[in-house]
Image (tube, rainbow, N blue to C red):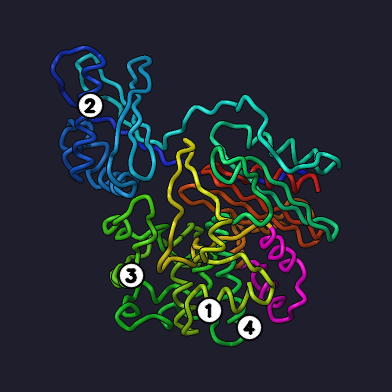
């Protein structure tokens, strides 16, 4: 039995402007192109890039489309720190643009008249090789399961773009944990089940659990309009009046993935959520125009789940972190799951790395914490998974059950927070997460009472490891 593939959407834009340069060597001409593009991105004047285009270019691509792409995919990365030549093949030149918060591959070609006839931007993917030495691990390699896990984990951790990996498995009422690599580069410390990682968007399932708890308490309804819980100045926007609470949790709200003013007001590109406040969120929502009819189309939205967290705070009068602690983690004795870490907990928190294995900042969250702001361990996440399967806490058990109910039946199927797959007779509940330097994955089969948790301190997806393991259980 094979599960549905998990795919990472890579944004790619092809442009075909024409631009004239003085006659020079091929390298010189391509360098000039890069200088101009860097200059206009730095100046935040994408209209100047558009102005370089011919009539044919302007007829095929609008200035608005170019500007929108540059704003959403370059500005959010901060300032350009450096650029470097990658290759030149068949008149196509490739350069790496290094921004504060990530790298982009710039590709273009010049026609016989020394004019640009193609320009593309895509996420930079470093060349991945295999590590020459066997990465350290706590796996005892005694049982069949140990060996199956090792095979799948090695495919991940032996790659040059990964650092550390922590794996947890729930099967037949027992838990199994494995660590690979290191908690930070070259420190020699293998992650264990109590090592703390960013769990990113798996936090959305906690937000959904809080919502389900309050639904069962009668404090909120899934069919309530979101405007019922927002300030009058925001609720006055008739567009928002169409959104129901359930739409925030199942990504059918008609809200975009990230708010535009998160980019324009971004003060720290390497830590993009840190300075995005409630005032900025409400200011954005006051004039927001829906991109789709609520309830009809799945479109993954961090702002939607973040807004749900705000609404839960407004209902309770407590912070999101207090709600998670009081309603979920304290009752379940998940003692290492928090938004903010104490100095003692911080000693167990990994360093985090991008795809080039360069250390980057762990992300901090303000108003959008409900979308991705929690940190946790494999041990805590196994407790969480076990309680999703069967909880002895009656109030939480009822809430977990509600989060598993299908609220959007098209592809992808969604409950509250959880994505749902139904291959053959089995039902799987899953979510993944990603920050600037971490990846996470959790998948649960309630019928078989199995679960897998995979946490990494690298910006390299872990879904394939988790799916591969649960297929063996």
Element under label 4?
helix
**For residue 285, which numbered disc appears in the image?**
3
Residue 409 visible somewhere in the drawing: no
Residue 201 picture location, percent across and down = 53, 58
Are the residues tagged 4 and 3 within 8 Å (C-beta)?
no
Element under disc 1: loop
Residue that appears at 42% across and 57% down: 257
Give the extent of the magenta segment.
379-408
- Dot 4 or dot 1: first in sequence order is 4
* Residue 64 location (% of width, % of height): 24, 47
Q: Nearer the viewer, residue 182 or 297?
A: 182
| Residue 37 part of the magenta segment | no
Give the Cα separation between the discs numbered 1 and 3: 20 Å
Q: Nearer the viewer, mark 1 or mark 2?
A: 2
Locate residue 54: give its quadrant: top left
Report crowding for label 3: few under 14, some 14 to 19, many 20 or more residues within 10 A (C-alpha): many
- Residue 346 at what x, y percent from top left? 53, 59
Give whichever of discs 2 and 3 has the lower sequence position.
Answer: 2
Q: Residue at label 4?
A: 216
Question: 345 or 304, which lies in front?
Answer: 345
């Amino acid at each position: 039995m094979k599960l549905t593939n998990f795919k990472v959407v890579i944004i790619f834009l092809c442009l075909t402007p024409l631009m004239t340069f003085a006659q020079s060597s091929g390298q010189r001409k391509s360098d000039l192109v890069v200088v101009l593009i860097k200059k206009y991105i730095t100046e935040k004047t994408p209209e100047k890039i558009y102005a370089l285009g011919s009539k044919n270019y302007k007829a095929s691509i609008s200035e608005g489309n170019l500007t929108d792409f540059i704003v959403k995919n370059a500005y959010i990365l901060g300032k350009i720190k450096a650029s470097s030549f990658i290759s030149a093949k068949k008149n196509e030149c490739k350069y790496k643009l290094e921004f504060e918060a990530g790298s982009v591959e710039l590709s273009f070609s010049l026609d016989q008249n020394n004019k640009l006839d193609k320009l593309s931007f895509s996420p930079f993917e470093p060349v991945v090789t295999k590590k020459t030495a066997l990465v350290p691990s706590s796996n005892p390699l005694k049982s069949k399961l140990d060996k199956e896990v090792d095979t799948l984990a090695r495919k991940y951790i032996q790659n040059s773009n990964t650092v550390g990996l922590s794996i947890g498995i729930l099967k037949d009422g027992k838990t199994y944990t494995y660590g690979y690599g290191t908690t930070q580069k070259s420190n020699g410390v293998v992650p264990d089940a109590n090592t703390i990682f960013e769990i990113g968007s798996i936090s959305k399932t906690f937000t959904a659990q809080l919502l389900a708890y309050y639904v069962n308490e009668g404090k909120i309804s899934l069919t309530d309009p979101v405007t019922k819980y927002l300030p009058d100045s925001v609720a006055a926007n008739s567009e928002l009046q169409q959104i129901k609470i359930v739409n925030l949790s199942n990504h059918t709200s008609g809200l975009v993935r990230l708010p535009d003013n998160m980019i324009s007001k971004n003060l720290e590109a390497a830590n993009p959520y840190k300075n995005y406040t409630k005032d900025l969120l409400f200011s954005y929502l006051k004039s927001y125009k829906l991109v789709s009819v609520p309830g009809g189309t799945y479109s993954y939205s961090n702002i939607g789940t973040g807004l749900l967290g705000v609404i839960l705070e407004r209902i309770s009068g407590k912070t999101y972190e207090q709600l998670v602690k009081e309603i979920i983690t304290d009752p379940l004795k998940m003692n290492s799951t928090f938004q903010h870490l104490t100095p003692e907990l911080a000693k167990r928190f990994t360093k985090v790395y991008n795809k080039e294995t360069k250390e980057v900042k762990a992300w901090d969250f303000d108003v959008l914490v409900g979308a991705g702001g929690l940190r946790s361990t494999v041990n805590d996440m196994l407790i969480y998974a076990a309680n999703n399967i069967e909880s002895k806490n009656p109030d939480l058990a009822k809430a977990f059950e509600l989060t598993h109910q299908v609220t959007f039946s098209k592809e992808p199927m969604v409950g509250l927070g959880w994505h749902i797959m139904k291959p053959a007779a089995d039902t799987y509940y899953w979510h993944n997460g990603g920050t600037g330097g971490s990846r996470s994955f959790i998948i649960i089969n309630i019928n078989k009472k199995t679960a897998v948790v995979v946490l990494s301190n690298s910006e390299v997806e872990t879904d394939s490891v988790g799916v591969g393991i649960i297929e063996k259980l």
